[in-house]
Amino acid sequence: MTAAGSRAAARWRDRVAASDPGLLRLAAGLRTVAAISLTLAVLPPLGADVQHLVAGAIAAMVATFAIREKQRGPQAVTLALGLPVALVSVSLAAGLSSRRVAGDVFFVVLIFCAVYGRRFGDRGTALGLMGFQTYFLSLFVGVTTGTLAGFCGVIVLAFACSALARFVLVPQTPAGILERLRQAFRARFAQLIDAQSELLDAGPDGVDRALEHVREGTARLHETAMMIQGRLEEGTPDEAVARLVQRRIADAEIAAERLGLLLLTARSAERADTLTLHLPGAPVPEGGHLPFRDEALDTLRRDLRALHLLVRHPVAEGTGTARVRNRLLGYREEENLPRASPAVQDVFRGVGEAARAVLGLRIALDGPQDESDDSPETVRSREELDAEDAVIGADHEESETGLRRPTTRAAVQVAVGSSLAMVGGEFLSSSRWYWAVLTCWIVFLNTASTGEILVKGYRRLLGTVLGVVAGIVLAGAVGHHTWTAFAVVLLCVFAMFYTAPLSYTLMSFFVTAALGVLYTLLHTYSLSVLVLRVEETALGAACGVVAAALVLPVHTDRRTNELLTTVLDRLTDVTTAAVDQLSGGPPADLLDRARDLDQALADLRAATQPLTHPVTPLRTRRETAHYVVALLETCAYHARSLAATAELLPSHPSIAADPRLRGAGQRILHNIGAIAARVAAEPATAEVLTGPSIASLLKPGEYGTPRYGRVTDRVLRHLQRLDEAVLGLARPLRVPVAGPR
């Protein structure tokens, strides 16, 4: 392969890795398609007809996608337990096929048990899903007591093919997934640097678009960091390595986000607010619409390109690479900074810190490196990282019970909603009423409030309507060509799993398109059948919403308030521990606390989707939700930065604890507590306090530390920004603000 071809292939791999972190979506689609293909390849020689082929394809798909465990051993156990569950389910469906009332009652009981099983973790969820879907399969293909034996054999074969696809044809190990996630992190890091370079050079007409690209790149990098943190325990050999990688990933994320903020400040007339990087649609700061050029900025553009290369090619060795790394790390020293404005010099410092983060990430992931061409600045950075590495080396239970337990509540809601869908579906069609029940079941998956169920029902209905149109076209194209039809179904199945994490509407579209082709195979296709599919889907979604709204309801406001309180509590934990350690207190487990904060914020972001969805008629409420989440993301960034700085104290030679910081952080902690109490509707009279800047709270004459190189100055910046962001939460959350003291 030529050099140009190698570069093109590398760029393509980077794009794929960045678009699908860990290749999880690609593997899910290929694994499911492989299981179905194996089943369809084995059944025809055994004399299976089209009905058995369709049943085998559905059973193979269910056996593959239902399993959620990360380790191969637990996956095998769940698959083995799922087979008898599936056989019992289809047997009961066949036995009750002639007893309509008893069959309907059992179906509702099965639905309740399947949803209630979620409280037992991934295995309980998978077994419940297999039981429900195989019962649905029997209704779809019409299993009776006379044909039961043949269909049971098909299901056994489908489970065997699923096992072969999972463990042999498309194997995935936790270590392999983690390695691909690391590659995705590097690819997204490089893409973010490209977006930051675009922001530096953008003109008045393109600066808002460039800033939006930086926001998207920052969010995508954080998403990948969270995915890596979720895989560290299973994908690393021991806890020390997991903590080291977690620390280096956090350092790189913070350095990348800080570099974007410094670039935005450099092209602005005033220091940019961190909120600008997190609030969609926020304008560029005043004076930030005109690009500029001089010798220092030309050097900066060159160094951003060099940083991009270091991120993309972390294992490249040679004198040229070493020189680039040495030059960038040299910007951590004051004497190596080029002559420029203070804001532009800050960007060069940010480039130096980003290069240090890349070096730390490379050492953590790839082991010791060649140090023969290191400059003194690079040697110092390595020594700091080694010291930090040495320091780093050194079951949640549900609190609610009964009907207040989320799994119990959801099971009751789904049972009621499914009963309504069953009755209503019978009025629409006595033979295909189960589509309404299936929709009601699905809209409750991975949802926790009435608003989330409403949005999911809307997306499923939209995808179904569009899928019906596609199904009509595909059914007419394939006609009754069996294998052509199955090939189209396989393409739709792959697309369904590949797009599922991105868009529920797209997933529903491909499901319905595939069903149109399956109906053709079963010789039951007609336009009226596809229209009935839309009607049953709308009915099932409506029944799900009604059940969620009337039976043990969890309103969106209540759900978001609970999660918001959790975020504020986690923010308090991280800030308290970080400030205490920065003030000279004992070391704390800051990395895990910061991870808990990020996870709580991700849960809140997902729960606010009903409030921020474009179809919501409450525009002011939508903008408020966007603003609050953006402020909390700003708070989380500064809290993570404080935690990362605090963890440097035991090893970093140029920083030291400052006892004065403990008092400076008290107002922030008081304000977070006051807001949390207000959101939780606790009887409290606490007000949010305002006053002088955090830096001025230090005793006069004691704040004389250099701007960089000591902990106090950088910590005070993060504390000041955190104080401003917390104060900004008071207005949209309607928390009273006291006057300055």
Image (cartoon, helix red, strand yellow):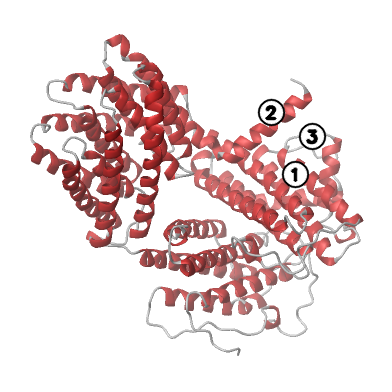
Q: Is residue 402 above or below residue 672?
A: above
Q: Quarter-wise, where is residue 1 in the image?
A: top right
Q: In this view, does 439 lie above or below 584?
A: above
**Image spot of residue 19 (x, y percent):** 58, 40
Q: Name the residue under label 1.
A: 308
Residues at marks 2 and 1, CA–CA distance in whole angstroms: 17 Å
Residue pictured at 43% horizontal, 77% vertical: 678
* Foreground: disc 2 or disc 1: 2
Residue pictured at 72% horizontal, 47% vertical: 194
Q: Which of marks 2 and 1 is nearer the N terminus?
A: 2
Q: Quarter-wise, where is residue 89 in the image?
A: top left
Q: Mark 2 points at which residue?
A: 9
Q: Residue 317 carries which label?
A: 3
Q: In this view, does 453 lie above or below 94?
A: below
Q: Earlier in the sequence, mark 1 or mark 3?
A: 1
Q: Which amino acid does label 1 sit on?
A: His
Front-lying residue, 176 or 364: 176
Q: What residue type is labelled 2?
A: Ala
Residues at marks 1 and 3, CA–CA distance in whole angstroms: 15 Å
Q: Dot 2: what SS? A: helix
